[in-house]
Amino acid sequence: MNKRSGIESRRKIMKAAKDVFSRHGYGETNIREISKKAGMSVGGIYLYFKSKEELYKNLINEGRREIAAMTETTIEQSRSATEALSNFLKLHLDYAVKHREFILLHIREHGFAFGLAGKRQFFQKQRRLIESVIEEGIRSSEFRKCNVRETANIIHGALRGVILSMALDDIAVRPEALNELVFQGLLRPDKKI
């Protein structure tokens, strides 16, 4: 098997597994169904993954790597801190809409504790990205001075809550609405807390 063929086979397995897991849930999915969907033998699947659990964990980790790479690229390509933060929020909302079924599967089947160490590391990196954007916004005078870490925690926590609500309650949140709340708040400019 050449390298290109191996990469393509692995990609087919991952795509098939995501579809089957999303439709049937982790518990009801078996490797035979994934192999059928991927157009491969069961043994072919086991050449790449030792078990259904390993395959599932690889799917989760690949999703994290994908969104992490997308967010880093989005921030790097932005022309300002405002644009970077706005694009960051939009990217996450769009990703949640596109992958809603897989997000639901993960919540339904494994709850919030599954792969906790990996989640913590991923979310910590995402918060650090937000912090760096806020710091740049303060340096460039786009944003007012604030407690950067606390502000990043609030923005990230709000985003996670919105994504969870979108998945669980099937509500729609427009990126523009989230941007308006983050950047403008609720309070009129002439009012104080």
Image (cartoon, rainbow, N blue to C red):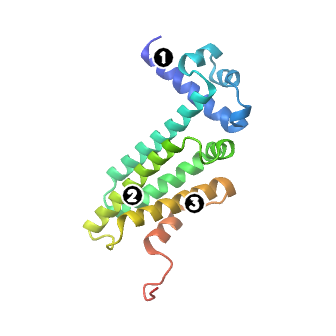
Q: Looking at the picture, does residue 135 appear above or below residue 16?
A: below
Picture coordinates of residue 143 (x, y %)? Answer: 33, 70
Q: Which amino acid type corresponds to the residue marked 2 in the rendered image? A: Ile
Q: Is the residue marked by circle 1 packed among few (<14), some (14-19), or many (20+) residues within 10 Å?
A: few
Q: Which mark is residue 5?
A: 1
Q: Which amino acid type corresponds to the residue marked 1 in the rendered image? A: Ser
Picture coordinates of residue 130 (x, y %)? Answer: 39, 58
Residue drawn at point x = 61 percent, y = 29 percent: 53
Picture coordinates of residue 113 (x, y %)? Answer: 59, 46
Q: Residue furthest left?
A: 139
N-terminal label among 3 and 1: 1
Q: CA distance from mark 2 to mark 1?
A: 38 Å
Tell me whether circle 3 and circle 1 mark residues in contact (CB < 8 Å). Answer: no
Q: Which amino acid type corresponds to the residue marked 3 in the rendered image? A: Val
Q: Which residue is mark 2?
A: 130
Q: Determine whether, in the image, residue 193 is placed left or right of residue 105.
A: left
Secondary-structure class at tag 1 = helix
Q: Which mark is residue 162?
A: 3
Residue drawn at point x = 55 percent, y = 41 percent: 115
Q: Is residue 53 visible?
A: yes
Q: Looking at the picture, does residue 15 appear above or below residue 157?
A: above
Residue nearest the observer in this picture, 109 or 88: 109
Q: CA distance from mark 2 to mark 3?
A: 16 Å
Q: Is residue 41 visible?
A: no
